[in-house]
Image (cartoon, grey):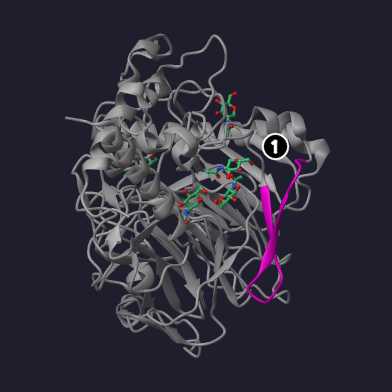
C-alpha cells in the first residue's frame, strides 16, 4: 500500500539520485573511477593533444550511475613534451562555453595553433541551438579559449547541413568533410534523418565554406575516415577509408547499404578534386568498418597510415586488430592486435615522432559503457617502428622510419610489382615530395605526425578566393559525383543499395522508425538503450530540459515517443526501486 510518506520518500530518493549523480561526476575521473570514454575527437597542437566532445562513464561511489554515460563538458589536454604512463598522466580540463557534443568534426590549423569544431551530435538533444563553427585557440601551455567563428560567406554557411560521421581531413588551409548524416540530434528543428551527399570544405584563412555537392542518390559516405597524404601528387592526396554508403533517398539502412572494404582505396586531389582508386595488397583488413581510427606518418620517400579497431553493424562485431597501409606500395601489414579488447569509436592521434595515442573507445556489442577499460584512463600507445602496444608514451622516441616488415617489402623491390590502376595513378606515386609535410595534415580521427612547427612549408593548396568560389564548387561537385559514382559502381557488386521508400517524410506517426538511434546511425545498439534511459531521466521535473523543438508543420514523431509521460512514470518506478542509490 503506497502511503503518502512512502510516495514522497520515493520522489526524494529519486531527486537525490539525479542530483547526487550529477554532483560527483567528472570529465576526468581518477584512473580508478574511469570506466569508458567514447565518441570524442582529438588533435595535436604543438606539445599538446587536445580532446574534444564525447561521453564518459565512470564509477561514482563504487557504482556506475543510472545514466551510464554523460556528456564531457570541457575540452581536455595532455602534455606530450614529457614522457608519461597512461595510469599517471595528468589530463587537464579546459572550460568550454560551447555545446557539449559527441562526434564533432575537427579541422586543425597547426600554423595558427588553433582547431575548429563543426557539427556533431547534441548528447541527449539538450539545449540545442543553431549550429555554429567554434574555434579553439591554444595558448601554447595546454590551455586555450573557445570562440565563435563567423563564416566568410554566411549564405553558403546557412545552407550547410550540420551532421556527424563525416570523414574529415585537413589539407593546407582547408578542412574537408566527406559525407556524413544529419538528424534531429545534429541540427536544431530537423524533423527527419538525412544522409549528406558529397563534400563540404572550410578554408581556415579565408573563412569561406563551400558545399561541393550535387543532389545525387549515389554520393554518400557515413562513418569513414580520411587522411591527408602530403607526400604524393602536386597538391597531396586525401585517401578515404571505410564507412558505408546508403542511398541519399529515404531512410538510410545500415543493414542494407553497401560498405567499403580496404582492398580498393579511393583518393582525391584536394585542390582539383579529381578522384582516383588503387587496389591494395598484403594483409587487407578483413571487415568493412566504421568507428575505427586512422593516423598517418610521413617518412623519407613514403607515407604510412595506421588503422585500428572499429566495428561492423551488419556483423554485430567490434575489432581489436591493427594494420599499417604503406604508400606508395599500397601494401597493408597486419601488426599486433591491441591488448585492450575489441573497441570502436576511439580517436587516434600521432604523438611524438612515431607513436599513436588511442583515446577511449568501447565495444558496443559487449557491455559498451559498463566494463572498465583495460587501458588506464582509456589511453594506449602504439609504437609505429617497434610495432608494440604499450601503456606509456616516450617523448624521446626517435624519428619515424618504416617498420621492419614494411622496409623489407620495399627492399625486396616489390614496389615494381604493383599493378597500377592507371598511368595517372602510377605517376602520382612515382615521386615522393621529400619536403616536410604540409602545414595541417591532420583530421578529426587522427592526423599526420608532423610536429606542427611554424618552420614547416605549407603544401601548395591554393587558397580559394571569393571570386573563384563558383567555379570551384562546380568542379568539386563533379569531382564528388564522379568519385561517388565510381564507388557506387563497385557497390553494386557488393550488394543492393538500400531501396528504402522515400515516403519517410510522411511517416511521422511511426516514431520508432524515425529514431536516429535505430536507423541511419552507425552508433551501436548501446545508444538505443542508453538514450532511452537518458531521456526518461531528463523528462522529470526540475532536472528536465525541454525536448528538441520541431518546426511547426513538420513531424514531431521523432521525439514524441521519447518524452511520453508514460515512460517518465516508468522511469520513476524503475529508479526508485533500484537498491542502494544515493
Ligand atoms: C555535463 O553536464 C551535464 C549537464 O549539466 C551533466 O548532466 C553531466 O553529468 C555533466 N557531465 C559530467 C561528466 O560531469
Ligand atoms: C556544457 O556543459 C556545462 C557544464 O554542465 C554547462 O555549464 C554548459 O552550459 C554546457 N554548454 C552548453 C552550450 O549547453
Ligand atoms: C541549458 O541552458 C541553461 C541556460 O543557459 C543552463 O542553465 C543549463 O545548465 C543548460 N543545461 C544543460 C544540461 O547544459
Ligand atoms: C550541400 O547541398 C546539397 C544540396 O542542396 C545538400 O543535399 C547537402 O546536404 C549539402 N551538404 C552539406 C554538407 O550541407
Ligand atoms: C575500385 O573502386 C573504384 C571506385 O569505386 C572503382 O571504379 C573500380 O572499378 C574499383 N576497382 C576494382 C578493381 O574493383
Query: Residue 326, how many percent across, how many down?
Result: 39, 67
Element carrying mark 1: helix
Q: Is residue 570 magenta?
A: no
Q: In this picture, is 440 found above or below 90?
A: above
Q: Residue at x 66, y 40 (%)?
A: 132
Asked if one can make out residue 175 in the rendered structure from this viewpoint, the answer is yes
Percent across and percent down for residue 40 are 46, 56
Q: Is residue 387 left or right of residue 124?
A: left
For the N terminus, the image quarter is top left
Image quarter where the C terminus lies is bottom left
Q: Where, by quadrant of the figure, is residue 486 drawn?
A: top left
Above or below, 209 relative to 183: below
Question: Left or right: 287 with respect to 133?
Answer: left
Q: Quadrant of ligand 5?
A: top left
**How many marks are shown on the rendered structure?**
1
Q: Is residue 47 above or below residue 497?
A: below
Residue situated in front as seen by the camera: 74 or 83: 74
Using the rendered image of the protein, determine whether residue 302 is visible from the camera's viewpoint.
no
Residue 414 x/y as whole percent: 32, 71
- In this view, the residue in front, 400 or 7, is 7
Q: Which residues are magenta?
A: 134-151
Relative to 212, say whether 58 is above or below.
below
Q: Please provide percent x and percent y for residue 375.
A: 31, 72
Instruction: Report the residue at 34% width, 59% height from top.
Output: 361
Query: Which residue position holds label 1?
Result: 472
Amino acid at each position: 500500500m503506497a502511503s503518502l510518506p512512502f510516495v514522497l520518500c520515493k520522489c526524494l530518493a529519486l531527486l537525490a539520485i539525479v542530483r547526487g549523480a550529477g554532483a560527483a561526476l567528472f570529465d576526468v575521473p581518477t584512473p580508478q573511477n574511469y570506466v569508458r570514454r567514447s565518441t570524442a575527437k582529438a588533435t595535436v597542437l604543438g606539445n599538446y593533444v587536445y580532446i574534444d566532445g564525447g561521453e564518459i562513464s565512470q564509477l561514482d561511489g563504487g557504482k556506475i550511475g543510472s545514466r551510464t554515460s554523460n556528456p564531457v563538458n570541457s575540452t581536455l589536454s595532455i602534455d606530450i613534451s614529457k614522457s608519461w604512463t597512461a595510469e599517471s598522466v595528468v589530463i587537464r580540463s579546459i572550460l568550454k562555453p560551447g555545446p557539449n557534443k559527441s562526434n564533432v568534426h575537427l579541422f586543425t590549423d597547426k600554423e595558427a595553433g588553433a582547431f575548429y569544431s563543426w557539427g556533431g551530435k547534441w548528447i541527449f538533444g539538450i539545449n540545442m541551438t543553431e549550429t555554429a563553427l567554434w574555434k579553439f585557440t591554444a595558448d601554447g601551455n595546454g590551455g586555450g579559449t573557445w570562440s565563435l567563428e563567423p563564416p566568410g560567406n554566411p549564405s553558403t554557411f546557412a545552407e550547410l547541413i550540420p551532421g556527424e560521421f563525416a570523414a574529415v581531413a585537413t589539407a593546407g588551409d582547408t578542412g574537408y568533410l566527406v559525407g556524413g548524416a544529419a538528424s534531429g540530434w545534429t541540427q536544431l528543428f530537423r524533423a527527419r534523418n538525412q544522409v549528406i551527399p558529397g563534400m563540404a570544405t572550410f578554408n581556415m584563412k579565408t573563412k569561406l565554406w563551400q558545399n561541393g555537392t550535387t543532389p545525387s542518390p549515389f554520393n554518400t559516405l557515413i562513418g569513414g575516415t580520411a587522411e591527408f597524404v602530403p607526400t604524393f601528387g602536386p597538391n597531396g592526396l586525401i585517401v578515404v577509408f571505410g564507412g558505408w554508403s546508403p542511398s541519399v533517398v529515404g531512410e538510410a539502412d545500415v543493414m542494407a547499404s553497401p560498405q567499403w572494404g580496404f582492398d580498393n582505396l579511393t583518393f582525391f586531389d584536394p585542390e582539383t578534386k579529381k578522384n582516383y582508386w588503387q587496389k591494395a595488397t598484403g594483409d587487407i583488413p578483413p571487415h568493412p568498418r566504421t568507428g575505427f581510427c586512422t593516423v598517418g606518418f610521413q617518412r623519407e620517400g613514403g607515407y604510412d597510415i595506421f588503422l585500428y579497431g572499429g566495428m561492423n553493424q551488419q556483423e554485430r562485431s567490434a575489432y581489436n586488430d591493427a594494420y599499417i597501409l604503406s604508400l606508395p606500395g599500397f601494401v597493408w601489414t597486419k601488426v599486433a592486435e591491441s591488448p585492450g579488447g575489441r573497441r570502436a569509436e576511439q580517436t587516434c592521434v600521432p604523438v611524438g615522432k612515431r607513436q599513436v595515442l588511442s583515446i577511449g573507445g568501447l565495444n558496443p556489442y559487449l557491455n559498451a559503457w559498463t566494463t572498465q577499460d583495460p587501458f588506464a584512463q582509456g589511453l594506449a600507445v602504439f609504437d609505429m617502428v617497434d610495432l608494440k602496444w604499450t601503456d606509456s608514451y616516450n617523448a624521446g622516441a626517435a624519428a619515424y622510419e618504416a617498420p621492419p616488415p614494411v622496409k623489407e617489402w620495399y627492399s625486396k623491390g616489390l614496389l615494381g610489382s604493383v599493378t597500377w590502376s592507371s598511368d595517372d595513378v602510377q605517376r602520382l606515386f612515382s615521386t615522393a615530395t621529400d619536403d616536410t609535410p604540409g602545414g595541417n595534415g591532420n583530421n578529426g580521427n587522427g592526423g599526420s605526425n608532423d610536429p606542427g612547427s611554424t618552420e614547416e612549408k605549407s603544401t601548395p593548396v591554393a587558397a580559394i578566393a571569393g571570386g573563384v568560389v563558383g567555379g570551384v564548387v562546380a568542379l568539386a561537385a563533379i569531382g564528388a559525383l564522379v568519385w561517388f559514382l565510381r564507388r557506387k559502381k563497385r557497390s553494386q557488386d557488393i550488394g543492393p543499395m538500400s531501396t528504402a521508400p522515400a515516403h519517410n517524410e510522411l511517416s511521422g506517426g511511426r516514431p520508432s522508425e524515425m529514431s536516429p538511434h535505430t536507423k541511419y546511425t552507425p552508433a551501436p545498439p548501446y545508444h538505443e538503450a542508453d538514450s532511452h534511459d537518458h531521456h526518461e531521466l531528463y523528462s522529470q521535473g526540475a532536472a528536465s530540459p525541454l525536448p528538441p523543438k520541431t518546426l511547426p508543420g513538420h513531424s514531431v514523431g521523432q521525439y514524441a515517443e521519447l518524452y511520453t509521460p508514460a515512460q517518465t512514470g516508468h522511469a520513476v518506478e524503475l529508479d526508485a526501486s533500484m537498491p542502494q542509490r544515493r
